[in-house]
């Protein structure tokens, strides 16, 4: 039987805080796959690209780490990253 959660315990650290911020602000996270592997990961806010990159053979945590780095760049510098079509 599971022990009830103690609300006095500190919350777990937030994973991928930059992705969380843009998603909380209304961004859409998409990871597309074909067959057994994921192909493309992207973040959009409304119709504005935040980032897009190829993620074939990457593990989920690697995809989320990369999304977080690119979301931070977007938050800090206002620069979108499109590694699929080769533009910034």
Image (cartoon, rainbow, N blue to C red):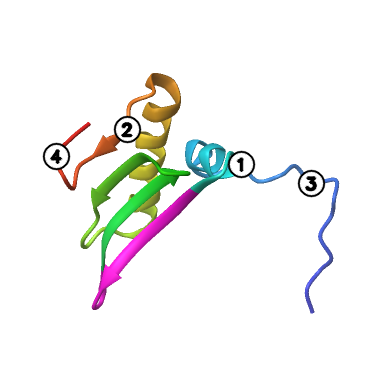
In space, the residues marked 1 and 4 are separated at their CA atoms by 34 Å
Determine whether the residue tagged by mark 4 lies in a helix, strand or loop: loop
Q: Residues within 10 Å of mark 3 (few under 14, many from 20)?
A: few
Q: Residues within 10 Å of mark 1 (few under 14, many from 20)?
A: few
In space, the residues marked 3 and 4 are separated at their CA atoms by 46 Å
- Residue range highlighted in magenta: 28-37
Name the residue tied to disc 1: 13
* Figure quadrant of residue 87: top left
Choose between 23 and 49: the one closer to the eye: 49
Task: Look at the image and say whether residue 34 sits in the magenta stretch.
Answer: yes
Give left or right: position of 44 versus 55.
right
Q: Earlier in the sequence, mark 3 or mark 4?
A: 3
Q: Residues within 10 Å of mark 4 (few under 14, many from 20)?
A: few
Q: Earlier in the sequence, mark 2 or mark 4?
A: 2
Name the residue tied to disc 4: 86
Name the residue tied to disc 3: 9
Mark 2 vs mark 3: give the one in front. 2
Q: Residue 80 — which label?
A: 2
Determine whether the residue tagged by mark 3 lies in a helix, strand or loop: loop
């Amino acid at each position: 039987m599971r022990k009830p959660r103690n609300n006095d315990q500190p919350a777990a650290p937030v994973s991928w805080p930059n992705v969380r911020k843009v998603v909380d602000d209304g961004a859409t996270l998409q990871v597309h796959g074909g067959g057994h592997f994921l192909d493309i990961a992207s973040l959009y806010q409304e119709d504005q690209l935040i980032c897009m990159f190829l993620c074939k053979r990457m593990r989920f945590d690697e995809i989320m780490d990369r999304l977080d780095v690119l979301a931070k760049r977007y938050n800090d510098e206002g620069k979108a990253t499109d590694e699929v079509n080769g533009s910034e």
